[in-house]
Amino acid sequence: MNGTILLLMTNLAAALGFMFCLWPVSLVKKDASMADIFWGLGFVMIAWLSFLLTDGYVVRKGLLVGLTSIWGIRLFIHILLRNRGKGEDPRYVAMRENHGKKFWWVSLFTVFILQGFLLWVVSLPLQFGQLPPFPDRFTWLDGLGLLIWMVGFTFEAVGDWQLARFLKNPDNRGSVMDRGLWAYTKHPN
């Protein structure tokens, strides 16, 4: 089998399997929000699998794995801490009420399998970026990618921090955060 096809199919199976394994835990906890919490770690898994399954330029592969790991772990911790003690996300509560007793089954496909597939699709550049062995040196495009990552990571991390501070202030209850980096990186809360 072609190495690219093997990589893509292995990562698709891993992403779907990862989300499928979260599904029964969400049923026991009655909280489909787990799919959101573990989303970032799914990218970390895909990055490492791609690293192990490809023969690309090892420095570029290491850069992709490292940056993805930093981003995915930060996102996992952020959403885990943000959701701690708050119960299920209102979107999933509404789905649970809408589907009633069928939600356990519906959530497998509309939440977990769908997010596993989307995780795989969004990670395609990460997967393909680890394939080519050439150029076998760090290029200006690698540097540009690193710069773009640094800007994006900073915007996301600082924006999330600004929103968290905003939400902790009781004077902001019922208000929409539309300032700082959050205003440029996310939709209004």
Image (tube, grey):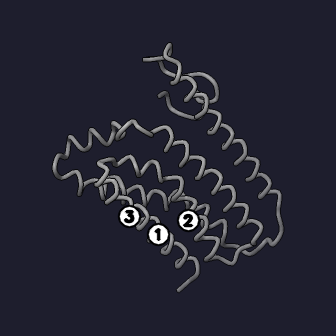
Would you call the spot at circle 1 few (<14 residues within 10 Å), some (14-19), or many (20 or more)?
some
Question: Which of the two discs, 2 and 3, labels the residue nearer the N terminus?
Answer: 3
Label 1 sits on residue: 14
Q: Compared to 184, does 12 lie above or below?
A: below
Q: Position of residue 171 (x, y in %)?
A: 50, 13
Query: Circles 1 and 2: CB distance less than 8 Å?
Result: yes
Label 3 sits on residue: 21
> Label 1, label 2: how many angstroms apart (C-alpha)?
8 Å
Labels 3, 1: front one: 3
Q: Amino acid at mark 1?
A: Ala
Q: Amino acid at mark 3?
A: Cys
Q: Position of residue 4 (x, y in %)?
A: 57, 76
Count of all numbered marks drawn on residues in the image: 3
- Element type where label 1 sits in the image: helix
Front residue (pair 173, 60): 173
Instruction: Please identify the residue farthest to the top as the structure is shown.
Output: 171
Label 2 sits on residue: 46
Instruction: Please identify the residue farthest to the bottom as the structure is shown.
Output: 1
Res 78 quadrant in image: top right
Q: Compared to 4, does 96 lie above or below?
A: above
